[in-house]
Amino acid sequence: MMRRPEVLDDPEIRIRWLRPKPPLSGAAKIPDSKVGQLLTLLDRSGIPQELEELLKDRPGPKGVRPRVVLAGLLLSAYYTGRATVADAWRILHYGLEPRARGWLNIPDRPPSWPSARIASSKRLYRGLDTVTTVLDPVRHDRRSRLPQRHADFHAAIWDSPDGRTAATRLQTLANRLVLATVRMAHQRGHLRGWNGDVGVDATSVPVMAHPDSRRRGTASVEITAGWHFKGGSGEKTFGYSATLAIAAHHRDHDDNPPKAYPQLCLGFELDTPTVRTGPNAVTILTQLAELGLPAGILAADRAYTGCSPPTFQSPVRRLGYRLALDYKVKERGLQGSWQGAPLVDGSLLCPLTPAPLIHATTGADDDTVRLRSDELREKIEAREPHHLKLKQGPDPRGAIRLHCPASGPSPTVNCLRRDRLRPRTPAASAMPVRVINLSEPPARTLPAAARPTIHIPDAEHFAPPPAEAMPRVCCAGSITVPADAKADWRLAKYRQDVHYLHTPWLNTYRPIRSHNEGANGRFKSGTLDIGNPKHRPAPGQVTQTLLLAVMLAVANLTVLETWLTERAGPDELTDADFEAAGPLPLNTGPAIAPSAYLTGRHPPPRMT
C-alpha cells in the first residue's frame, strides 16, 4: 500500500494501466465491402446528418465526427457482439483496410506508441460524449454518484416539457437506425409474406450501475433507471425497459400455413420502467406507419390494456391496427355498454343476450381462462351468434359501424323485437348489386329454424313499447362505435376487435405473444446479447439508447442473413440489399428547444 503513490507517479506505468489496449495477436482485417454496407445503412438512416446539424454551432474543436463513432460501434456490434468504445477503437485502428480507413478519415497506420494509443482512444470517447451531450435533456456527471436530491432534480427535468421534447427527439433519432433495416427488408421484398401483425412488449434492459443507496444518501449513476418487474414471476431487474415491436402473424381459420417472412424488430423505445408504457408503443407504430407498411392486428399483454385510452388504444386504432388484448380478473365479464348493447369481454352483444352467457367469465382467474373447461367453452361458443356484426370498417379516426345480429343479409339470431321495429322488405327481383369476391369462402346463412331465438320480456309481447324507449342498436340500421374515450372511456379502453377467448382470439393472441417472447429470447442470447450490461457498459439513458439501437440494428441484419440462408439464398446481405434501403422519411419530430441545460461544452462534475 505504501508503494502505490510512487507507482502512480511513474508516467510509463500509468500509460500501461490505461485502457483500451491494442489486440495482442493482431486483429483480423474487415473487408471493405462490409464496411461500405454498414456505412450505407448508417447514412440512409439520416442519423449522422442530423447529429451534424445539431453540432454545427457547438464551440470548440470538431474532434471525431458522429459518423465515425457510430460506424465503429456498428462494426464492433456486428463482429464482436459488444457495442463498446474500446472494441470500436480496436476495429477502427487495427481492423480496417486502407480504403475503408480513407472513408472514415482514420490514419493509414495504427498508433504505435502507448501515448498515441491513449490519445486516439480518448478522442473516440470524447466523440461519443459529444453526441450524448447534445442529445441529453440535462447534462450531469454520469461517472459518479450524485446526492439523492441533486439526482432527483436532474430526473425531474426529464419529465419537464423541454425534457420530454429532447427525450422524444432522442428516441425518434435512435429508432431510425432500426427502421433503416426494416426499410431495407421491405424494399427487397422480404416482407411480402408479412400481413402487418405486430406484437408489442416491454423487456428489461439491465445496467451495470447499482441502485440508489439509502444508507449513503446517494443516487444511482443511472438517474432515470428503475426496477423492471417481470409479470407473473415477481422477478425484478434494475435498469430500463425497452418496448419492442416485433413482426408477427396469426393463424387463419382454415389452418393455412403462414407465408415466410423474417421476424424483425420493427422499432424500440428505451425508457424508465412502467412509465409511458402506452405512448412509447404509439411512437414506434407512428414511425413504422411512415414507411408504408401494412397495419394488421396488434396484440399486447395486460400492461397495455391498463393504459389510459388516449395514450394507447385510441391512437393505435387511428393508425389502422385492430387490437387483441387480455384482461385482469376484475376486468373480465360485463365491462360497460354502448347505446344499449352490453360490452362483454371487449365485444358488444345483443341487449337481450342471456345473463349466463354475459357473466360466463365474470371473476374467472387466469388458470380458468388458460385451461378452459367444457362448460366455459360451450358458453363462449354460445356467445358467437349474439355479437354485433361489423357493417363498416374503421374510418380515418378509427370508428367502426356495427349492426344488430338479427339484421343484414346473414342474420345469426331470430328476434321478434327487431322484426317489429324494422320489418324486412322483400328484395326486388332485379340483378344483384352486391359484389361477390370469388376468392373468399361464401358466407353461410343458417336457416331460421337453426338460428337461436332471442327471448323478449313477456310484457313486451302484450304492450310493445315505442321505438324511442328501445335501445338504439335494436331500432337503428347500425350504430357508430368511436375509437376515442370522449364518448365512453370503458368502451375505448376494453373494446377489442377479436372476440375474447373464442377460437379466433386464441389463434391470434397466443401466436403473436409467442413471437414476442421468442424474439426477446433471441435478442438476449448468443454472441449479441442486449440483456448483458457488459456489452453496453457506457452509463446514461442517452448512451444506452444509442447503443441499444446499434445492437438491435445488427440483430435485424443477423435475422435477415439467417432467413436468407435457410431459403437457399446468399449467406450474407449483398450491396444491392443495402442500396435498396433508400433514405428514410425526414424526421418531423419536435426540435430541441434552447435551454440553459443544453448550452456549454462539458457538464460540471457536481452540482453545488
Image (spheres, rainbow, N blue to C red):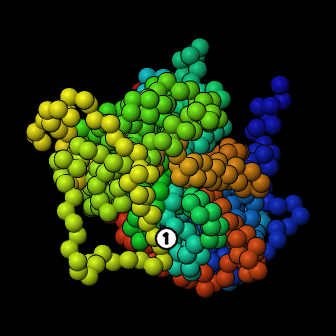
Q: Is residue 200 left or right of residue 587?
A: right
Give the quadrant of the C terminus: top left
Task: Please give left or right for residue 160 compared with residue 383 in the image.
Answer: left
**Quadrant in which the N terminus appears:** top right
**Residue at (48%, 31%) from the top-left corner?**
360
Q: Residue at x 60, y 81 (%)?
A: 577
User: Callout 1: helix, strand or loop?
Assistant: loop
Query: Is residue 573 among the parts visible in the rendering?
Result: yes
Left or right of residue 417, residue 573 in this image: right
- In the orientation shown, which residue stands out farthest toward the bottom? 576
- The x and y percentages for residue 79 are 74, 65
* Image quadrant in which you'd find residue 446: bottom left
Quarter of image, res 456: top left
Vertical position of residue 530 compared to residue 148: above or below:
below
- For badge 1, the amino acid type reads Pro
**Foreground pick, 287 / 359:** 359
Look at 53% across and 17% down and name the residue there.
217
Residue 529 in view here: no
Q: Which residue is mark 1?
A: 441
Q: Residue at x 45, y 47 (%)?
A: 384
Residue 237: quarter of image: top right
